[in-house]
Image (cartoon, helix red, strand yellow):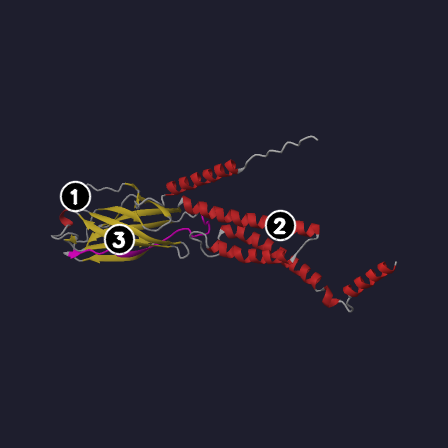
Amino acid sequence: MTDIAPKKRRNPAPIILAVVGVVLVVYYVVVSFSGVLDANTEVPISGDNETSDSNYLTLRMSTQDIDLTNRVVQAKVIPIPHGSLLGDKSGEISRNLRIEVSSGGITTSVVTFPGESIVDPTSLTLSLERGDSAYPFDTPYADFQLSVQDDETGRAVPFVIELNNSARPWVLAGHRGADIAEGERTLVPVTIDGSRDLLSITLVSFYVLAILLTTLMAVVIIGSAIIRRKLEFSNVIWLSATLLSFPALRGSMPGAPPIGTAMDFIVLFPCLVLIAGMLLWTGIYMLWRESSVLRQRTLEEEEAAAAAASAASAAD
């Protein structure tokens, strides 16, 4: 008797562990470069953001929220005096100052700081260009103008801008344009450009991939069941659960805006239509098949027929 040598097959565990390791490395690289772990919120500002005057202000702006649906940026600003503008106490301004912010073609905020007073942060609302239609590859920007005047003399006060970002998960960059002289006022155009961080874009991509793969699996499973004539009620339940889960999955994406973005028209809506169409077809088919008993005028007694058949076979 010949001994049959046992067949050897390759152990897939090392490959699986290697793939998991690569995925983890890619994930941590994305987290590191996305800046989500960076505690520094300072936003770089290009352009001529310096002054040669020793008596100047530092306008420290901090973005609090970026609302793409309403196209506004919520920020806070606090002036920090230097030189002769600095009062006797820390944080005190020696003169009456007037700060104007023009956004969207209109003056949106006018803040007056009385002399010899302690300055508190003031909230501002800036208009945004571009909404959330390109989610998650949104690139909104805000164009606005700043001017600082001595409220008594009306003369312009030199200032530099310091921008901090507290609106996560946005990555911001600022640009200061050339000063514009308007009478005794000096208008300073400022642009803030924003984009979603790399981690948010990566997570949204995984969600989109899950929706596409689930839809493709549904097409393959239902198509195979139809060809093999093995369509079951469990297929209908699975399709209905998938149809309900897609909107919930889309709503759980990082920073998901309301329905109506380009991603919805390209990915979500076609997948929902495919799943709904298969659910409707399989539901009608199952309903017609399972209701055949109710549509029959006479019922076949299967047990009686089986007994008669067994009796006939015994008699033979």
Instruction: Judge left or right: residue 285 versus residue 174.
Output: right
> With respect to residue 299, does 233 lie above or below?
above
Instruction: Point out the frontmost of discs 2 and 3.
Output: 2
Residue range highlighted in magenta: 117-136
Identify the amino acid type marked 1.
Answer: Ser
Instruction: Judge left or right: residue 136 versus residue 84.
Output: right
Q: In which quarter of the image is residue 5?
A: top right
Between the C-alphas of marks 2 and 3, the distance is: 55 Å
Between the C-alphas of marks 1 and 2, the distance is: 71 Å
Percent x, y of residue 270: 57, 52
Disc assigned to residue 219: 2
Between the C-alphas of marks 3 and 1, the distance is: 21 Å
Instruction: Judge left or right: residue 74 versus residue 133.
Output: left
Say few, some or many: other residues with alpha carbon within 10 Å of mark 3 (under 14 / 14 to 19 / 20 or more): many
In the rendered image, which quarter contains the C terminus? Answer: bottom right
Res. 104 visible in picture: no
Identify the amino acid type marked 2.
Answer: Val
> Mark 1 highlights which residue?
54
